[in-house]
């Protein structure tokens, strides 16, 4: 009964995702919307179609392998075997949990490595995006693995101890676990640029000059307080363009990719930043934080249910209440909820993007914003005609044709 329910959930999520991938894959054979046809000339249009097709096939292959992996672990007794291995190494329940999860995640990462390597050094390389050396690739993976061990292990330790204290009062466990995770998220947001990004990239102040002066003048004009304006060496890994800001209140920091500074005019850069400033003015960061707070609260409630479901552990030959297996089952069971919750949050995010575009246009006009959007799409080989269902589920930003159409209609 329980095994059948888990199988239905795992296969159901996979089939829905595969169906959406298929719908979006077929879109590449349709004509592009009229207002974005000038983004690609014929040669680049064919390049986009091939790039899109290759990425879709690789993503489907990766999801298929992950599906087979989790089914084998569940129904071939691998999880039970891993628990035994971890139990033979220590009598501590906490260390047993950390070893169990560490072994599972390490295997999961190793299975994913060939896909990541192929993505970087075959697809991205052949389409002119990759600037990552093999040395950088290896060190990035090692750094990511160490961060997972430190912060993932730390979070598991925290939740394990909270559960140990409040095991008899699950309402308090849910409340304390939720509050702890939210606090961690706030701290992470404050340290994102100053600490975590710098583990992988070099960030330095944007040099004095006309571009910086214009950015500062724009921020002053709209009353947007910024702690720092920085440049990141994104070209070390890719030719794609981007910019972002992080932090709250007076701690907000603007970070521009060096590729964006190289390829965009000052007017285009200002339009992109005005769009980002709008998210701050419209309190979109706080809205997203509130959405995450609700989502995490619901998820912690489900986690408590999973931890106390004896039938779930018995079905797969795991010791009753084993925390490590509970976390993995929780991650599987939230997939349908995550899918449904994402429909709402993605919709709200797309609405916010329209509002931010409107704000930028009000300040700087249509021409520079449309030009910036088309350049971003062209340089990244963006999908200019995604399927509406795929957009509804996965897109936090509206498709480029709709964004440009909304600007043109103002």
Image (cartoon, grey):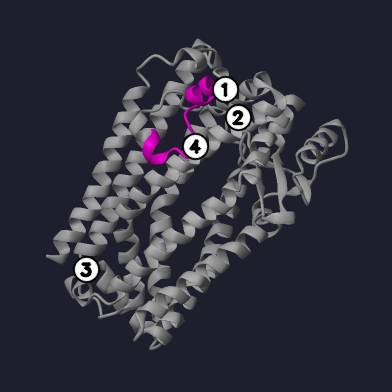
Mark found first going from the N terminus, 2 or 1: 2
Q: Position of residue 138 (x, y in %)?
A: 56, 52
Mark found first going from the N terminus, 4 or 3: 3
In the foreground, 133 or 153: 153
Residue at mark 4 to residue at mark 3: CA–CA distance = 46 Å
Q: Is residue 162 visible to the viewer in this orientation of the structure?
A: yes
Residue at mark 2 to residue at mark 1: CA–CA distance = 7 Å
For the N terminus, the quadrant is bottom left
Where 218 falls versus 117 (above or below)?
A: above
Please report contact status of discs 3 and 1: CB closer than 8 Å, yes or no: no
Q: Secondary structure at mark 1?
A: helix
Mark found first going from the N terminus, 2 or 3: 3
Please report contact status of discs 2 and 1: CB closer than 8 Å, yes or no: yes
Span colored in magenta: 391-407
Residue 351: assigned label: 4
Q: Position of residue 31 (x, y in %)?
A: 39, 14
Where 347 falls versus 75 (above or below)?
A: above
Disc nearest the viewer among 2 and 3: 2
Residue under the point 71% across and 40% down? 256
Extreme residue toward the left, this view: 1
Give the residue pinned by disc 1: 407
Residue 358: assigned label: 2
In the foreground, 112 or 379: 379
Mark found first going from the N terminus, 4 or 2: 4
Where 402 falls versus 169 (above or below)?
A: above
Q: Secondary structure at mark 3?
A: loop
Residue under the point 62% across and 58% down? 189
């Amino acid at each position: 009964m329980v095994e059948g329910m888990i199988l239905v959930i795992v296969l159901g999520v996979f089939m829905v995702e595969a169906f959406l991938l298929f719908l979006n894959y077929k879109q590449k054979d349709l004509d592009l919307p009229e207002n974005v046809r000038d983004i690609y000339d014929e040669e680049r249009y064919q390049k986009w179609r091939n790039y899109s097709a290759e990425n879709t096939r690789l993503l489907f292959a990766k999801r298929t392998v992950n599906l087979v992996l989790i089914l084998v672990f569940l129904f071939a007794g691998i999880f039970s075997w891993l628990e035994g291995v971890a139990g033979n190494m220590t009598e501590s329940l906490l260390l047993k949990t950390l070893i169990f999860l560490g072994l599972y995640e390490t295997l999961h990462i190793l299975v994913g490595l060939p896909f990541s390597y192929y993505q970087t050094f075959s697809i991205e390389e052949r389409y002119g995006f990759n600037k990552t050396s093999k040395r950088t690739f290896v060190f990035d993976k090692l750094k990511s693995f160490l961060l997972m061990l430190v912060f993932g292990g730390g979070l598991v330790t925290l939740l394990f101890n909270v559960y140990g204290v409040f095991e008899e009062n699950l309402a308090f466990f849910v409340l304390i676990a939720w509050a702890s995770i939210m606090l961690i998220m706030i701290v992470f947001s404050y340290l994102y640029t100053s600490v975590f990004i710098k583990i992988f990239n070099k960030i330095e102040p944007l040099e004095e000059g006309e571009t910086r002066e214009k950015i500062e003048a724009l921020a002053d004009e709209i009353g947007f307080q910024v702690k720092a304006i920085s440049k990141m060496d994104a070209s070390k890994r890719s030719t794609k363009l981007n910019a972002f800001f992080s932090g709250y209140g007076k701690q907000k920091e603007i970070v521009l990719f060096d590729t964006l500074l190289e390829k965009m005019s000052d007017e285009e850069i200002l339009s992109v930043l005005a769009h980002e400033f709008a998210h701050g003015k419209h309190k979109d960061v706080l809205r997203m934080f509130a959405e995450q707070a609700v989502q995490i609260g619901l998820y912690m409630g489900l986690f408590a249910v999973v931890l106390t479901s004896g039938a779930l552990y018995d079905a797969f030959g795991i010791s009753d209440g084993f925390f490590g297996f509970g976390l993995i089952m929780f991650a599987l069971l939230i997939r349908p909820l995550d899918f449904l919750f994402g429909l709402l949050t993605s919709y709200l995010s797309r609405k916010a993007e329209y509002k931010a575009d409107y704000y930028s246009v009000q300040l700087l006009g249509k021409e520079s914003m449309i030009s910036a959007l088309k350049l971003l799409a062209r340089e990244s080989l963006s999908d200019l005609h995604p399927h509406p269902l795929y957009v509804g589920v996965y897109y936090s930003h509206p498709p480029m044709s709709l964004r440009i159409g909304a600007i043109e209609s103002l």
